[in-house]
């Protein structure tokens, strides 16, 4: 068992070292402006609807070889989570911090300076109320699955433009207030456009 582990580890190390030589500029930092569009959620007579908003997404990516790499992202936006039901109506203005990590699959094409990709991973969304419109409202973190894809357009050797779509799947926030708990999974669409630096 130990011999198999050591052999596999050595093979991966050799492969990774050889693969790194194929990527001249394996690191990339990106800055993107995003739109955030959340699907409405219902449970019985209770409806949860988030306002649409704009935000910022910053990322760091490392490409291991021509096929694959890893990317970490931090995003920020502010919107309002609106709830209605037998309790009446409630609105909670919220800062949302997004922290995700993804595997990136680079898709080879025969076009110069065009680099499409697909991504999948996970992370967390932190919903942080900006005020206390209801008693008991508190910051809440929700785990999320992220998927998507996009295209990098190299303008120069070190700089380019990026268009991307990300989808996030997570449980609707309730801010630890039992009357706001829908126990539903929702979807956030996050199209974005921006620029990047490679080095």
Image (cartoon, grey):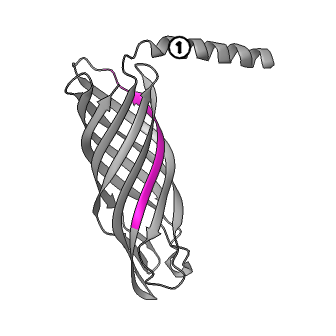
Instruction: Give me the residue at 52% from left, 85% from top.
Output: 135
- Name which residue lies at 38% across and 34% down: 118
Nearest to the observer: residue 65 or residue 106? 65
Looking at the rendered structure, the number of numbered marks drawn on it comes to: 1
Q: Which image quadrant: the C terminus?
A: top left
Question: Going 50% across and 72% down the picture, which residue do you hit?
Answer: 174
On screen, residue 151 versus residue 127, left or right, reads left
**Res 15 → quadrant:** top right
- Nearer to me, 101 or 39: 101
| Majority secondary structure in the magenta region | strand
Residue 132 seen by the camera: yes
Where is residue 10 shown, x and y percent of the image?
A: 65, 13
For disc 1, the marked residue is 17
- Where 53 sits versus 88, above or below? above
Front residue of 97 and 192:
97
* Up-down relation of residue 133 to residue 140 (above or below): below
Image spot of residue 8 (x, y percent): 67, 16
Residue 183 as seen in the image, left or right of residue 45: right
- The picture places residue 25, in percent across and down from the top left corner, at 36, 21
- Residue sitting farthest toward the left: 155
For disc 1, the neighbor class at 10 Å (few under 14, some 14 to 19, many from 20) is few
On whether residue 94 falls in the magenta region, the answer is no
In the rendered structure, does residue 105 fall within the stretch colored magenta? yes
199 or 81, which is in the foreground? 199
Residue 158 point in image, percent of width and height: 27, 25
Q: Is residue 144 above or below residue 154?
A: below
- Quadrant hosting residue 148: top left
Numbered disc 1: secondary structure = helix
Q: Residue furthest right?
A: 1
Residues drawn in magenta: 95-108
């Amino acid at each position: 068992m130990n011999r198999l582990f050591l052999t596999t580890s050595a093979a991966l190390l050799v492969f990774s070292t050889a693969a790194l030589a194929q990527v001249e500029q394996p690191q990339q930092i990106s800055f993107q402006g995003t739109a955030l569009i959340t699907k409405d959620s219902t449970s019985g007579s209770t409806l949860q609807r988030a306002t649409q908003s704009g935000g910022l997404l910053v990322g760091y990516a490392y490409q291991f070889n021509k096929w694959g790499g890893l990317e970490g992202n931090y995003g920020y936006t502010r919107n309002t989570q609106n709830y209605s039901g037998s309790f009446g109506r409630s609105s909670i203005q919220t800062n949302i911090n997004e922290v995700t990590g993804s595997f990136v699959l680079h898709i080879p094409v025969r076009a110069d300076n065009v680099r499409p990709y697909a991504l999948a991973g996970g992370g967390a969304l932190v919903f942080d109320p900006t005020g206390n419109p209801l008693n008991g409202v508190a910051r809440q973190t929700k785990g999320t699955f992220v998927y998507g894809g996009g295209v990098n357009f190299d303008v120069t050797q070190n700089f380019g433009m990026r268009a991307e779509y990300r989808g996030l799947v997570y449980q609707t926030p309730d801010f630890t207030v039992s009357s706001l708990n829908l126990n539903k999974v929702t979807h956030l669409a996050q199209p974005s456009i921006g620029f990047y630096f490679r080095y």
